[in-house]
Structure formats: C-alpha cells, structure tokens
Amino acid sequence: MQQKVENYEISGNPYIEVDYAGKYMNKPDMEGKSVSIIGLGYVGFPLACACAESKCNIYGIDIDPGKVKLINEGICPIHDNELQKNFNNTRFPATNDFSVVGRSDIVVVCVPTPVDARHNPDFTPLERASRGILPFLKKGHLIIIESTVNPGACEEVVQPILEKSGLKAGKDFDIAHCPERIDPGNTTWTVKNIPRVVGATTPEGLRKALDFYRGILDAEIIPMNSIKEAEATKIMENSFRDINIAFVNELAKSFSAMGIDVVRVIKAAATKPYSFLAHFPGCGVGGHCIPVDPYYLIKKARKNGFNHRLLQAAREINESMPSYTVNLLMEELEKLHIPVKKAKIGILGVAFKPNVADTRESPAFKIIKLLSEKGAILHVFDPLVKEESTVGSIEELIDNSEAFILITSHREFLNMDMERIKQSNIKVIIDGRNCLDKEKILGMGIIYKGIGR
Ligand code: SAJ
C-alpha cells in the first residue's frame, strides 16, 4: 500500500534528506524482520500484534509469568475485546527470557514509567529492561524506547546501561524514541493509525526506526531532529492535557460559588469553531499518564534550574479534586444532620476512566481513604474492578446506601435504575463526572451536587 507521507516541515533536520521524508514512499516490507518487544501491557501487546500482522519474526518479552502464560495460550492479557479479536489472528510467542533479544534486529521497550510516593520519576522498570538487553546487545541493534520519559532520559538513563557492553550508541548500535500514544479503550484511534513521532541517535538509526513503524503501521510517522525532541513532544502533549483539566477544575470551584453550571459554559465555549478544546471537571485525574508525566518534566527542569510553576499549580489543583468532592458530600450530610460516622455511603466506580478496568492513580482510592478515615460505612461497586468492589451490584449499593459518589462514568452507570433510587434511602448524590441527569434526580427530591454544576 502506498504510504501517505505529508510534506513535513523538516527544515534543518540533519537526519533526513527531503526525498526520504517528503515524498510518497512504498510501505517498507517488514516480513521476516526480527523484533523483540519488552513489556506486553496496553502499549507493547498491541504493538506486538501489529508486528505479527506484518509478518515480523516477533518475540514478546515480559517479566510477569502469568502474562506470558496467557499470551502463549492465545489469551489477550488486557481486558479488551477488540485486542482479543485481533490477537486471534496475530499470535506471537511470549517469554521471560531476554536472550531472544540477541536474535532480534530491533528491540522495543514498552515498560511503565511511574512516579514514587513523592512524585519522583521511577526509572526502575526502564533500567531493568535496559539491563535485560545488555548481555545480548549487539552491533547493528536498534533499541527503541516507547515509554513516556522526560527529555534526556533515553540518553541519560538507558544509554549508559547499554554502553556497559563496550558498544557505543550512535556508532555500534542506535537508540530511538517513539513515544507511545495509546488511548486504552479507544477503538477509533488505535496503535495502527495513531500518528507517531520518532527521534534517534543517528540518521541511520532514524531511517531504521521510520522504516519499522511505517512498515508495521498505517499511520503518519514524523521524523524529529533528535531523541530529546521526541521525548519533549509526548511530555508536552500530556502536560497540556493536565493543565487544561486543572483549568476547568478551578473554574468548577469558582463558578459553583456563583451558581453557574460550568459544564454548560464549557459546552457553550466549545461552539466556537476554532481555538478552543473542551475539557471537563471531575472528582480527580487518574491514570498512568496525565497525573504522572508532568512530574517527569517538573523534576528534570528543576535539575536544570527552571521551575515549572504552571505545571506544578495544575498538579496541585487536580490533586485537590478528591477532597473537594468529599467535602461536597460532607456539606450536604451536615445540612441533613446526618453524621458521616457510620453513614452508609456508596462508591460507584474505582477505575480511573470509564469502561476500562485500570485503577492506577484513580481518585477513587483517595476518596475511599478520606471517607473511611471519617468513619463512613462504604459500599464500593465497579463492574470492571470486582477485586475492589465490596458489593456485587449497583442495585445492592443503592439498596444499602444513604448517599453515593459517582467516581467513574462507566456505561453501566449512565442509565441506572432511577426508580430504584427513588424507592431507596438515598438522600444525596455526588456526581463526580457530571454524567447523571441532574434535573431528574432533583425532581425525585434527592440532593444533587456535580463538580461545578
Ligand atoms: N479527565 C478529566 N477531565 C477531562 C479529561 C480527563 O478529569 O476533560 C480525567 C479522567 O477522568 C481520568 C484522567 O483525567 O481520570 C485521565 O484521563 P485521559 O482521558 O487523559 O486518559 P488516559 O490517562 O488514558 O490518557 C490517554 C493519554 N494517552 C497517552 O498518554 C498515550 C493521553 O495522552 C490522551 O490525551 C488521552 O488518553 C485521551 O485524549 O484520551
């Protein structure tokens, strides 16, 4: 298939001649290319499937024996029906044996880059993956890092470990960075069609990386001038989102005090056909990307003597939302003279975003902790996170609660049985994602509080 290549603004790009990046190109043939993918989570697993689909000689590597076993039994290790369907036709072998790296031309690292309790970048998984590669690193290898990191991390964390082999990056092997852009649960934008940016240590390394991604994906692959540029692109994307969410969260608090429904205002602003991108307030910002990535930039910049005041302020605003949400409930219980101690409170949703089972950095945990510390009796239900649920259904939660907080707008919650709520003992509903029918709830004589509405 003719690979559509836009004319990139590549002025000054020392790595790529115009003819390579500016013209239409044939899709590079990846058949038989030997590829190892380290980390078979929501990033590495679909990428491995794409490699298998392009008939690469693909090895999946993961340190989790349970995940390796599932994959070798043909079971997708992620709760995702689309991925499972795709995997049925794009099987690949998984192992926890890094020696397959020695039989690969390209190694792609897709491991988590979390922060610790003090919000410091935790490079442990990336360092462990790099040390796993080290004994099998060879001349001509292309090592691609997809994990989200701050500018400089590939050359300051990964490269020194790999060069313990005696081989030299940029001379004996290449490092590239192609930040992952997977949006879990998104069936419109998938690993196959999301545009990507790539930076590498040398022009040859960049070519190899461009060929690899253009060979296995059907997306625009944009060459960058350096690894740092590629690292900076992803960190900026996610910091941009965190700041915009913080902006509407702050507006929610401000407009609420003025009796203005901030959701209606955001939707009205979104009618402006240019230069506005709607974000919405909520009970907190979870996930392994948005609440984490800005800290990588904040910490790195601080080492260079720069203080990201705006990024820091956005993080503080977003981190305040769980307690803001609990306080909304406390205020209403107080008005009803219902002591929070021993009050029966429902918690609807634990996952960090709708229709996924992922609970990383979910605001639910902070909300549960705050209410538990106040002595409330909690009934937790998330249809996708059974292990955190304390009741077996939304009906059981409704029947046993005096109030509830909706934390995750799972599709199961959007059309909950309002009649049952009406018949129940529920007096207060806190809608942490502004996704319930406010008028209907008020019409039933139940107190409704959203986030900014
Ligand atoms: N959230 C809000 N208000 C919003 C949007 C999100 O409060 O307007 C909250 C969500 O409830 C969730 C958290 O922020 O708790 C993160 O939500 P998210 O939609 O950003 O979900 P993620 O973490 O899966 O973000 C991914 C990211 N993708 C990658 O890092 C590759 C991010 O870059 C994308 O922008 C995002 O998907 C997306 O746009 O869906």
Image (spheres, rainbow, N blue to C red):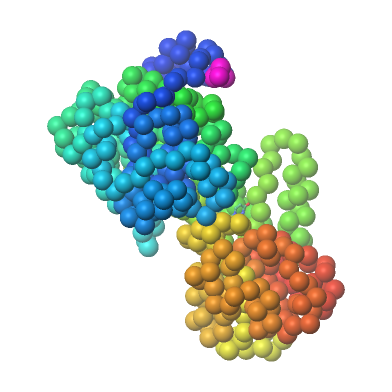
Question: Would residue 107 be counted in the magenta stretch?
Answer: no
Residue 302 visible in the current orientation:
no
The quadrant holding residue 425 is: bottom right
* Total marks in image: 0
Residue 416 spot, x, y in % from top left: 73, 68
Residue 260 spot, x, y in % from top left: 77, 61
Chief SS of the magenta region: loop
Q: Residue at the left extreme?
A: 166
Q: Residue at x 37, y 23 (%)?
A: 208
Q: Residue at the right extreme?
A: 443
442 displayed left or right of 352: right
Q: Please state, as top left, top right, bottom left or bottom right, where the C terminus lies in the image.
A: bottom right
The quadrant holding residue 34 is: top left
Residue 124 spot, x, y in % from top left: 29, 52
Q: Residue at x 51, y 51 (%)?
A: 290
The span picked out in magenta is 1-5
312 displayed left or right of 125: right
Q: Please state, as top left, top right, bottom left or bottom right, where the N terminus lies in the image.
A: top right
Q: Residue at x 68, y 63 (%)?
A: 412
**Does residue 189 sit above or below 281 in this rendering?**
above
Residue 376 visible in the current orientation:
yes
Q: Nearer the viewer, residue 412 or 291?
A: 412
Q: Nearer the viewer, residue 372 or 351?
A: 351
**Does residue 400 sit above or below 380 in this rendering?**
below
The quadrant holding residue 441 is: bottom right
Residue 375 spot, x, y in % from top left: 53, 86
**Does residue 89 sit above or below 344 in this rendering?**
above
